[in-house]
Structure formats: C-alpha cells, structure tokens
C-alpha cells in the first residue's frame, strides 16, 4: 500500500519536473541571410560567404530543451546553400540536418528554408555550410547550448568562446576546381589560422612592437582577439574547430587547462599544458587566472600533422587592469613539433568519460570495417572507403528512401570489409577505385561498431590524419591502435569509461574503433571532416529506421525526382 503511494508521488514529481522543464523551454528565432561579402578576415580583403552581411555568422545561444528556428534566406546569386548544425542530433527532425543531397535539397537562390529543431543537450557546437566546399568559403558560426539552471557539473565564473578555422587567399571555386582537375592541384596550406574569424596574415602579432607599420592593424575585421579576464577567477573557454584542413594545437602561456567537455559531452577532468583539436571537434577547458597580474599572456594556436607553412594564431589573455595592447612579457607558447604524433596520441588517449556518462552496450550486433585510401578514378585523385568514393546523387536520400522513390542512388550494398592481405603501410597496389552512392542500411535499435582503418596514401611513407564525424549521433570511442586492426583488439576495447564524441581522430597508419546505437530515424553521413577530403569522396551514408521518420516538409523534398513525384 505504502509502496503504491510512494510510486504515485514519484510519478507526480517526475511529471511536475518534466512540466517545469518543458515550460521553461523556449523557441529561439533567427533570420539568416546568406550572401557573398567583401571581408578582410586576415587583413587582406577577399570575397567570402557571410551571414547577414558579416563573418563569421551570428552565434546561436540556447538552453538545453529549447527549439531553435532559423529562417535561412539564400542570397547567393547563382548557387544553392544548406547549413548543418554540427553536433545537434536532430531527433525527430532528420530533414533539418542541413546536408545537401542527403537530408534535403540545396536551397535555391532567393528561396527561404526554415530549420526548426530541438537542442537536446548542453554543449559547445557550431554550424557550417554542407554543400560543396562552402564551409571553407566562410559559411560558419558558433552554436552554444547551456545546461538547465544548476545542472552544470562544474563551477566557473565566466566564459569565452573561440571558434577556430583556417583561411586561404585562393577562393573556394578555384580550390574546388583544382581538386577535380588533371593534373591535380592541392589546396596547399592555409595562409592564416583564424580565431573567431580574425587573423593577421604576414604579421605575427608576436613581433608587434606598436610602431612597426607591418603590423599596424586598423581594420576591426582582423583585429587580434583579446580575452579579458579578472584575476583569481575560473574561466570556461569553449573551443571549437571548423577548419577546412588543419589539425590544431592550443596552449596558453603560464596557464594549465582542465579539459571538462568534448563534443557536448562531459569528460573526466584532466589537466594539460596544451590541447590538440581536429576539425569537427569541440572542447571546454577551465583556466584559473592565478598568475602575475601585472602581465598579459599569449594564447597560441599552431598546426599539427602537416609541415606547417602557416604562422601560429595568437590571442591575448588580458588581465584586468592591464591595458589591452600591453604585449605579454614572455614568448608565445610553441606548438609541439608537427609530426610528433606521440604527443597527440598521449592527449587523445587521456580523454575519457566523466563518471555517470551512459555506458555502451557490451557487444555489437554488427561490425563494419572502413578502409581509408587515397585512390585514382580515371586519373583523378580521390579518397575512397572500401574502394568506393562517395558521390552523392542530385536527389536527397532521406525523401527518396522514405517515399520509396527508385533509382535515386546506387542499389549496390557497399562493402563492409576489405581484403585481409591489404598492406596498410604501403601505397595501394591497385590504386583504382570507383564512385558510388550506395547506402549502409542499419537495423533500427541495433549496436554498430565501425573500425576506421588508415593506410598509406598514393605517395610512399605518407599517411594523413582524418577526423571522422558522424551525423545524428554521439558514439563511444572504444579504442585506437597503430597499424592494422586485429580481431583480438576487440578484447582490449575500453568499455569502462569510453568518451562520447561526435568526431574522432584517425591517426596516420592507425585504426580507431567506435560504437553507437541506431536509435535516431534518418539518413546520416559519416565522413572525414577535412573539407577537401569529403569533397574528394571520403565518406559514407547510413540509413536507420527511415520508416519511423514522420512527414518530411515539402521544402526538403522539392527537387530532383522526388520533387517531380510530389508535384504530380
Ligand atoms: Cu561538421 Cu558533415 O559535418
Ligand atoms: Cu580526411
């Protein structure tokens, strides 16, 4: 009897607290007008993509549980556009994921599309273009979701956000052409690393003396980033990377950092001198301003994994009441040597889940191995997964699968494995691969493991970093290893405290294992987050529970074959 009353009370309490939460949830409205602008992100004027006439795009800020409504108007004169909300799961709204040819049609010039979705989980996120290489043209901004009041598991006094990116002086159309031409023209290293859309080309701030004309910055579009802090406080730095290519390392002079969040998931706090951050990742770190208050300090960001030809990016930590322009008395911290992978691995392996993070199922239902190779198709250089280079069709997958439209994409089942004798340490014996648009169909509510396997590229003794990003999900990172993945490695998987992430690094010549549950009806890409690599085919498309997707808004369907059917 008493038990029943207790149960009743419990139910009432949980209903009430849910009600409270849903009552507090808000809709947050934004108008985005996407268009070309003249801008000087690194003090050199170029044409780029901006939102509402500015670069980077506006910061979206919400609380977990809120609904975000973005009315996106495409004012690019002659090209389509979409925006992807990186790290947001789109539970129940897979058509709002913003992936051209996958979740929706690209929005035509002069047309408007409304993205409406819930942000279910607090964290540091961002958004970016997901059509061609529009991200590299500057189409991005921050998206920050706060925890419900009093639910943040750590304390801090204030915060600063740093959205990191890299920038080329060559425009994206030329970059895109170079990648799909014979002979191949690689985009090369970026001219400048940007912090919150600002950098200084050809003028290291570190040499700034206040009078050298070389570094006289009069344009606010490229003014150095200054983070103002008060002494003896704890600050949260939200750091996200939407670089087109670069893997980055960030350090702050005289200050250690405590990593507390990765990709919108809390991690076991770990104290470090510097962090590595790959394209598609985000971290929150806490710093304490307990250093000599008569000085300012450098925050510096350098390139990892590629022979850097780009100046490190610098920002100033400005201790109150020092002047903003007072240069730090010590030299900026120096990034570890670009190819010291042991340093990167040591950092990456340290990131584990905070106690209380959901645990992965103990076993998977299906294991899919994904061989990452650089290939050739008819003489063009491509990237392939299990020897298929992704080429998305003009009609979006989501609508065509949901409504059973035939002949939109290849019906061929993509391979789940690769030949056992493939030598991952050598260039491919047969470099030829083929284009494909097949879908990995995953049973709904099943547990999937992906084993990403890195290899040697087309050139001897070269293997590159690939940060892999999954849409629609967080996944558990079960392990990393050097060389070729072996069956026996499964026994070594970390099932105790694997971090939940949405982007994970694949180290040169190594493997990375992830696990997730197919509990989000929709069609989701899983791809390398390096913009030119994705453009050259480095990704796959997954489908799960498409039959459970509710009615897709017409605007997400109305192009290609699906659009025609719809109109008939
Ligand atoms: Cu941030 Cu499909 O990417
Ligand atoms: Cu890649």
Image (cartoon, rainbow, N blue to C red):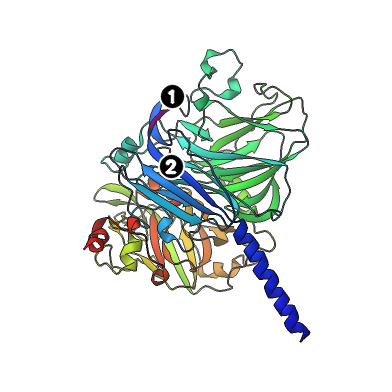
Question: Residue 206, relative to residue 443: is it above or below?
Answer: above
Residue 483 locus on image (x, y percent): 50, 57
User: Residue 387 appears in which quarter of the rendering?
Assistant: bottom left
Q: Quadrant of the C terminus?
A: bottom left
Residue at the image position 45 percent from the left and 43 percent from the top: 31
Majority SS type along the magenta span: strand
Nearer mark to the viewer, of 2 and 1: 2
Q: Is residue 10 magenta?
A: no
Residue 509 locus on image (x, y percent): 48, 53
Q: Residue 411 versus residue 59: which sits nearer the camera?
A: 59
Residue at the image position 29 percent from the left and 39 percent from the top: 177
Taking the image as shown, residue 220 lies to the left or right of residue 523, namely: right
Question: Residue 257, relative to residue 455: is it above or below?
Answer: above
Question: Residue 3, relative to residue 175: is it above or below?
Answer: below
Residue stretch rendered in magenta on the structure: 37-41
Give the secondary structure at mark 1: loop
Residue at the image position 50 percent from the left and 67 percent from the top: 449
């Amino acid at each position: 009897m008493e038990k029943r009353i207790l149960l009743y009370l419990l139910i009432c309490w949980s209903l009430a607290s849910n009600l409270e939460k849903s009552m507090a949830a808000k809709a947050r409205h934004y108008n985005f007008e996407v268009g070309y602008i003249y801008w000087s992100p690194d003090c050199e004027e170029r044409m780029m993509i901006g939102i509402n006439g500015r670069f980077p795009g506006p910061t979206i800020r919400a609380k977990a549980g809120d609904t975000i409504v973005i009315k996106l108007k495409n004012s690019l004169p002659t090209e389509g556009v979409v925006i992807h909300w990186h790290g947001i799961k789109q539970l129940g709204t897979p058509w709002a994921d913003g992936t051209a040819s996958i979740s929706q049609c690209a929005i035509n010039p002069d047309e408007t599309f409304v993205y409406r979705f819930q942000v279910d989980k607090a964290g540091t996120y961002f958004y970016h273009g997901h059509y061609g290489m529009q991200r590299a043209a500057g189409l991005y901004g921050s998206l920050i979701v706060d925890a419900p009041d009093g639910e943040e598991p750590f304390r801090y006094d204030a915060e600063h956000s740093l959205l990191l990116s890299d920038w080329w002086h060559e425009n994206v159309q030329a970059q895109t052409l170079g990648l799909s031409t014979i002979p191949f023209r690689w985009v090369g290293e970026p001219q400048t690393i940007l912090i919150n859309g600002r950098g200084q080309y050809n003028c290291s701030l570190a040499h700034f003396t206040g009078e050298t004309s070389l570094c006289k910055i009069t344009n606010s579009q490229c003014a150095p980033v200054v983070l103002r802090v008060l002494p003896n406080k704890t600050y949260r730095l939200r750091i996200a990377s939407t670089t087109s290519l670069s893997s980055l390392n960030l350090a702050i002079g005289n200050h250690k950092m405590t990593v507390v969040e990765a990709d919108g998931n809390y991690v076991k706090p770990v104290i470090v001198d510097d962090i590595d951050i790959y394209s598609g990742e985000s971290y929150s770190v806490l710093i304490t301003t307990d250093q000599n208050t008569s000085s300012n300090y450098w925050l510096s960001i350098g390139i990892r994994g590629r022979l850097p030809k780009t100046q490190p990016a610098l920002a100033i930590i400005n201790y109150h009441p020092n002047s903003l322009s007072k240069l730090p008395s010590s030299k900026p911290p120096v990034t570890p040597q670009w190819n010291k992978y042991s340093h990167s691995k040591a950092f990456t392996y340290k990131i584990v889940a905070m106690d209380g993070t959901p645990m992965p199922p103990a076993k998977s239902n299906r294991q899919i191995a994904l061989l990452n190779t650089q290939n050739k198709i008819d003489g063009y250089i491509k990237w392939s997964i299990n020897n298929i280079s992704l080429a998305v069709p003009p009609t979006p997958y989501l609508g065509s699968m949901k409504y059973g439209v035939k002949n939109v994409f290849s019906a061929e089942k993509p391979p789940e494995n690769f030949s056992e004798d493939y030598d991952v340490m050598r260039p491919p014996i047969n470099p030829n691969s083929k284009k494909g648009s097949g879908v990995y169909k995953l049973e709904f509510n099943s547990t999937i493991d992906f084993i990403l396997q890195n290899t040697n590229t087309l050139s001897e003794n070269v293997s590159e970093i690939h940060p892999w990003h999954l849409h629609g999900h967080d996944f558990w990172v079960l392990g990393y290893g050097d060389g070729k993945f072996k069956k026996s490695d499964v026994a070594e998987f970390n099932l105790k405290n694997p971090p939940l992430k949405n982007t994970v690094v694949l180290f040169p010549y190594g493997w990375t294992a992830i696990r997730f549950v197919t509990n989000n009806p929709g069609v989701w890409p899983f791809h390398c987050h390096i913009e030119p690599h994705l453009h050259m085919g480095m990704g796959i498309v997954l489908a799960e529970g498409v039959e459970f997707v509710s009615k897709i808004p017409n605007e997400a369907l109305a192009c290609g074959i699906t659009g025609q059917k719809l109109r008939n």
